[in-house]
Structure formats: C-alpha cells, structure tokens
Image (cartoon, grey):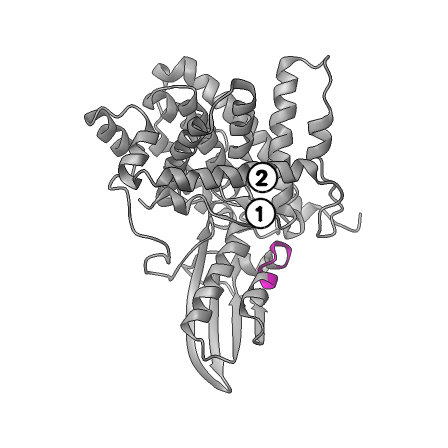
Amino acid sequence: MKSIREIYKIGKGPSSSHTMGPERAAKHFKAEYPQADRFKVILYGSLSKTGVGHGTDRVIQEVLSPLPVEIVFSKETLENAHPNTMDLFAYMGEDLIGQLRIESIGGGEVRVPGEKTLEGPEVYPENSFAEIADFCKWRYIHKLSDYVELNEGEEIWDYLAEVWRAMKQSIADGLAAEGKLPGGLNVQRKAKFLYESNNRQYAPAMEEFRLIAAYAYAVAEQNADNGTVVTAPTCGASGVLPAVLKYAQDTRGFSDEQILRGLATAGVIGSLTKRNASISGAECGCQAEIGTACSMAAAALAEIYGQDLDQVEYATEVAMEHHLGLTCDPICGLVQIPCIERNAVAAMRAMNACNLSYFLTGSRNISYDMVCRAMHETGINLNHRFRETSEGGLAKLYSRRK
C-alpha cells in the first residue's frame, strides 16, 4: 500500500480526477517531449462527458500553453478501459513524435494502463484492514497513527501538519466568501450564512449540525470555486474530514498533534479503499468518494476520541456501509449539486458512525474489508449513467433553462 501522502494532495478544485489528474498527466507528457511544438489530447468516458463542467479542458490548456493544443471530447467507448482515460500526442511540425495513454484513477493519481501509477513506491506491507489489525496486535500497537509513524517515519507529521493548515485555511476562506459559484447554476454560497446563524434557542444537536455543516460547505464551496483544498480522498469529497476535525477541535479542545493522529488514521482508511476498491466517482459512483470520505472521517474521530482498533474499524465500516449504491450525477457536470450538500450530510453521518462504534463494536458481523469489496462490486455494476457522466439521475432531470 502506498504512502498516505498520495491520499492528501493540496491543490485546486473542482475535481481531483478531472482537473488534478489531467494536470499531472499533461505536465508529465510535456516534460517527456520538450521538443514538441504542438499537442493533441483526446478525452474519453467521464473526462469527455463532464470535462467542461469540471474544467478539464481549461487545466490542460494552461499546462501545455503557450504551445497550441487540440482537445477532443470523444464519444467513443473504450473497451476494458478506466472511465477517466485520455490519449496525449506530441508533434513536431507534421510528425508525431510521441503518444501516451493515461488513466486518471481518482484523488489526483494517474497511471499508464497495465503499468504502475506515476506516484511513489509501496510503503506499507499490509494491504487489508485485517492484515493491519493482526500486525498491530502482534506488535502491541494500539493506534493506527502509531502504525503510520512506524512505516512512514517521523517526517510524516510535518507533512500532515501542512495538510491540516491547508484544510483549516480552506474552511476559513470558505466561511469568509459570499456570492454565486461559477458555472451558470447560480448556486449561492451558504457556508457563511450557516456559520453566522447562531441562535441561543437552538438545541445542542442543532448547533452541532449547524457548525459541522458550515465547515463542510465552506470547503466544498471553495472547491467548486476552483479554490485550494486537500483531497480527502478527492476534491469532490474534500469537505467531510476537515469539517468533523475542526468541530472536534473547537468543541473538545483537541491539540493539533491529536488532530494529526486523526489524519494519519484516516489516511490509512483512504489508502486501503483506494487500493482494494476505488475512490473514483467515474469508476464506482459517489459511494467511492463521499463514502470513503465518511469512513475516513469516522476513523479519524474514533482515533482522537481514544477508541481501540476494533472500534475504529466498526466506525469505518458503518460509515461506508450506509453509502453503498450512492450514485454520482452532478448537474451540468459541475461539482455543486448535489456534491456540496453531500459533504455536510456525510460529515454528520461520520459523527453518528463514530458514536455507534463506541457502544456497539462487540456486536458487529461485518468487517471493513468486506464492505470495501461490496462497495467496489456495487460500483462497477452501476449503470454508467450514474458514474459521473451527467447522463442520469438529477443531472438528467434538471434543466438549467427552468
């Protein structure tokens, strides 16, 4: 399993698979052919169908500029290919000097089909939660965050500190911003309104929801506005984890060091899901993005609240189990409706999953490895219209002319 650094990437929204991934692919290809005087890029599948709304063409143009680049939104269906596939061609005059097919597999990560990804090496020998739990119990390791430090080294804390600073900044920026989000849907920012809607008559549960929702909206709206966010595990689901951690720190007084331990544990869950299932909405629907984000958040909370390994797994499993089948149907290909609200709802569900794990861990029958496999099986069997193509569900029924 790879480093949790590959789960947490700091970058611009609105989509890790449709903007950050293609950006990385274009930079890699441009560096491979510095002698080229023009490029051509063909986008397939979800990259083609929602690329304009996600800004795929924009980011490719920016990376390959000032050289001319032709971008083709192909309607061809590639057999046995990842839904986020792109072909890149480099030319000198009329001569084709290089070409490469790359898949954007989620979370900003890209790979050449049939080969390893362009990311870093394997860091963790264990590749399932069961293997990790067995190792930790054998070595008397009681926290997943200690397991992370053992494999990644002490320098991982500096990286996670940078991640936490970026997460808090995205919340602060989102809470301060007002106005409409770009793209033509006329979606108003709501984070500031939620945050400032303080009322002493609210019940404690309502106050908890208001603050968590405000934080989740803040990050998700920053993402939708091409702002800087941290993939956790993706841009579209980037509001869930920072929302619950910021709320926990504000209300329970957790130190930044404790929050970093939560991030470490969440990173393990994200990495496991990425390896054994998917974090790509185009491949497995929104359950792969928001479901994984909810599991990561539930695990982080369980860690900082002092729960044991079994409780962490239960919280993680409950969070994913109740997102199974969630489709990805962004209206007009924009990461706004229903994406922003889903971040807030998933953040609250993470809190609930963590609370259940405190009481009911001993009664569970399902492992996280099992629910992870179920998510992948469910996702690959979803109709393609419900996997980030904007051809089904809300995206199909909505008309911006109404």
Report the residue marked by disc 2: 169
The disc label shown at residue 300, or none: none
Q: Is residue 355 left or right of residue 52?
A: left
Taking the view exactly as shown, the residue that stands out farthest to the bottom is: 94
Measuring from the top left, give residue 157's x and y in whole percent.
Answer: 38, 37
**Which residue is more in the foreground, 171 or 189?**
171
Judged from the image, the secondary structure of the residue bearing numbered disc 2 is: helix
Query: Is residue 242 shown above or below 30?
Result: above
Disc 1 and disc 2 in contact, CB within 8 angstroms: yes
In-image side of 276 versus 89 (left or right): left
Asked where in the image residue 119 lies, by quadrant, the reply is bottom left
- 75 w.r.t. 120: above or below: below
Report whether 17 appears left or right of 138: right
Numbered circle sitting on residue 228: 1
The reply to whether the magenta stretch includes residue 235 is: no
Residue 341 visible, this orientation: no
Q: In this view of the protein, which residue sits in the foreground, 56 or 284?
A: 56
Residue at position x 58%, y 47% from top? 228
Instruction: Tell me where residue 255 appears, x and y as whole percent.
Output: 47, 25
Residue at image location 72% in from the left, 21% down from the top: 198
| Residue drawn at x 54%, y 69% as measured from the top left | 64
Q: Position of residue 193 (x, y in %)?
A: 73, 31
- Along the line of sight, which residue is nearer the eye, 200 or 111? 200
Residue type for callout 2: Gln
Q: Quadrant of the N terminus?
A: top left
Q: Earlier in the sequence, mark 1 or mark 2?
A: 2
> CA separation, marks 1 and 2?
9 Å
Residue range of the region highlighted in magenta in the rendering: 52-58
